[in-house]
Image (cartoon, helix red, strand yellow):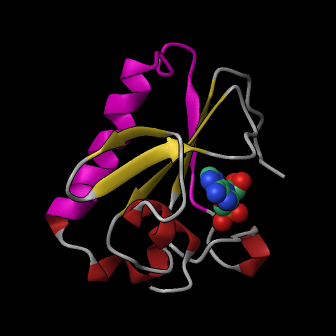
Amino acid sequence: MDDCLFCKIISGDIKSDKIFENEFVLVFRDINPKAPVHLLVVPKKHIASIMEIEKLGHGEIAEIMGSISRIAKELGLDKDGFRVVTNTGQGAGQSVAHLHFHVLGKRTFHWPPG
Ligand code: AMP
């Protein structure tokens, strides 16, 4: 997608602070962190949101979910708990129309979220 910010990050046209990358997934630090650790986990294939999840293969989905738990463990987020969020649509505050999972950690989180 020519006009997609995260596609440009995936292609390397826009720089990011990469944490992990493989054939299917890129993980990088959010530029405007909302917690001491704030990562974005994105599929390399462009889909707008979780509402298009059927466009990804089972292997890609497993890789996204697997990378979240693997990286959470590597960074020690699992010890005290962490949050995984995918804002979907305007009402939920989605600002980039490329599926991404926020992984937030190293602070206390409240429920329900705002
Ligand atoms: P959302 O608002 O849920 O769609 O999340 C989009 C996220 O992308 C926000 O948390 C932004 O801070 C983040 N973001 C925007 N531009 C960049 C960038 N160039 N590098 C890293 N994160 C970004």
The answer to which quarter of the image holds residue 110 is: top right
**In terms of depth relative to the viewer, which is nearer, 98 or 65?**
98
Horizontal arrangement in the rendering, residue 17 relative to residue 89 (left or right): left
Name the residue furthest left.
59
Q: Is residue 82 shown above or below 90? A: above
Residue beneath the point at 63% across and 72% down: 96
Q: Quadrant of ligand 1?
A: bottom right
Q: Position of residue 107 (x, y in %)?
A: 72, 22
Q: Which residues are magenta?
A: 59-86
Q: Is residue 77 visible?
A: yes
The answer to which quarter of the image holds residue 109 is: top right
Q: Is residue 99 visible?
A: no
Q: Position of residue 98 (x, y in %)?
A: 51, 73
Name the residue furthest right.
114
Residue beneath the point at 26% across and 75% down: 56
Q: Is residue 5 shown above or below 21? A: below
How many numbered marks, from 0 up? 0
Name the residue furthest front.
13
Name the residue furthest bottom.
2
Residue beneath the point at 73% across and 69% down: 92
Residue beneath the point at 75% across and 46% down: 32
Horizontal arrangement in the rendering, residue 101 relative to residue 69 (left or right): right
Q: Position of residue 64 (x, y in %)?
A: 32, 53
Q: Quadrant for the N terminus, please.
A: bottom left
Q: Does the stretch in magenta take in 107? A: no
Q: Position of residue 94 (x, y in %)?
A: 69, 70
Q: Is residue 9 shown above or below 53? A: above
Q: Is residue 15 shown above or below 45? A: above
Q: Does the stretch in magenta take in 65? A: yes
Horizontal arrangement in the rendering, residue 78 relative to residue 24 (left or right): right
